[in-house]
Image (cartoon, rainbow, N blue to C red):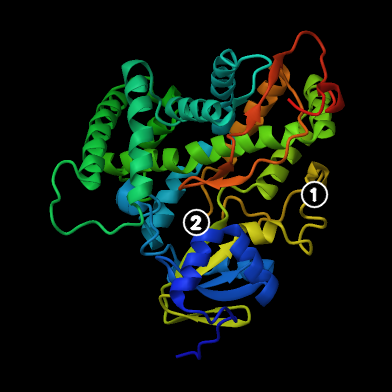
Amino acid sequence: MATTTLPPGPSVPNLIQGMAVMAGGRRTMRRLRDRYGDAFTLWMPILGPTVVVSAPAEVRQLFQTPADVADYHDVMNLGRVLGPGSLFALSGAEHRAQRKLLVPPFHGRRLRAYEAIVEEETLRELASWPENVAFASQPSMMRITLNIILRAVFGADGAEFAHLRELLPRAVTLGSRLALLPRPSVNLGRWSPWARLDALRCEYGEIIDRMITRAEADQRLDERDDVLALLVRSRYEDGSAMTRGDIADELITMLAAGHETTATTLAWVVERLRRHPTVLRDLVDEVDAGGSTLREATLLEVLRTRPVITQTLRQVKADSMTLGRWTVPKGHSVFASIALIHEDDAVFPDAHRFDPTRFVGTKPDLYQWVPFGGGHRRCIGAAFATMEMNIVLRTILREVTLVPTADRDERWQFRGIAYAPGRGGRAVVRRRTGRQAPQSVAATGGRA
């Protein structure tokens, strides 16, 4: 067995370390990095002994490590609440086979087929935005992304659309809260959180079962682009179809992974652009000219400076794992800190400056820019989310004027799944009439 060699770390009792992580979050990680370097060991609540890495070379090695050496954590695994057919719950050959079936809907022609849905839902929501009144943009973004997923992924409409729109957010929110808790071995009754989750999942399963039955009988199924239809038609290499349970689990996984995170990033887009009027003005000029280069770079920069998920996690499954300078024993967690990588001046010069031009004409290194994770566990919907944000932002810039502000940056607020702007990405807008560029901060009196 290899000799354990772990990075340095604090020597205070585990309880104190855990309290510091819970209370300080990103600030605690930054202080530990400043003291111990780009890798350190600490005790984290739920995870136990954890190696935190932020050097791109070690992050690359972690992402390239086979699943039988390091994979999803036994405790922090959403598959326990999303279902046994979820990508979160699968590993090894099962994971590879399922992932292979899920890739086609999120690339190429299939991806472009969803653009009209994204624009329609954005326009529908923008019609309700008040003028010259400050409001939190995140709830609007949540409605937009939920409706998009229900139409593009679930293929829902009519009564089923309305039912899922009310049901799924409750199920995902409750499931995310229970994901880190062990399921009780005794029945706690119908009013326990686990019983409520089971009831919601049963209700969800009945809806999806009806939708799959209808899809299987649809004579024009081959013409449909929604993901549910594509999964019904898909076949593994041995010719077998996905089970109904697996389809249901994967659909709710796509919702859980892509609804709140995408909406939160769009709220951060609003928050960032209102505080950078030059970038905002250039984006409006670009959208009026029919371009997209700066808009795409701006989304990359928002995802770098305001990643809504600040870490990606693995657990050592083999007897040990060699990671750069370190040898990590079985059972230890390895925590790649997305936030620490993204704010490292050695990786991104002047990293704390919001500068979309750093990505104009260049693609980010996917072992340095990692908001979607990496390796065999990289978010399968990354391309879909990027397209979605691009079309939503294009539509917003075309339809309304975002009024700049000199207010302080909104604080990061952890909301159970994602880090969101503390005030919800406050927006002030005016309807665009003709060619109307954003006002300067000075013209708004320094406040919106």
| Number of the label disc, if any, that sits on residue 98 | none
Q: Quadrant of residue 121?
A: top right
Residue at (34%, 35%) from the top-left corner? 170
Question: Whole-percent x and y of residue 303?
Answer: 66, 45
> Image quadrant for the C terminus?
top right
Tell me the SS state at disc 1. Answer: loop
Q: Which residue is mark 1?
A: 353
Residue that carries the numbered disc 2 in the rendered image = 377
Where does the image place residue 183, in percent across and percent down from the top left? 24, 56
Instruction: Name above or below for residue 96 compared with residue 233.
Output: below
Task: Identify the residue at horizontal 35%, vertical 55% (top origin).
Answer: 89
* Nearer to me, 380 or 177: 177
- Please rate how many residues cluster around mark 2, counting C-alpha atoms within 10 Å: few if below 14, some from 14 to 19, many from 20: many
Left or right of residue 241: residue 395: right
Q: Nearer the viewer, residue 105 or 311?
A: 311
Compare residues 249 and 164 and report the one nearer the observer: 164
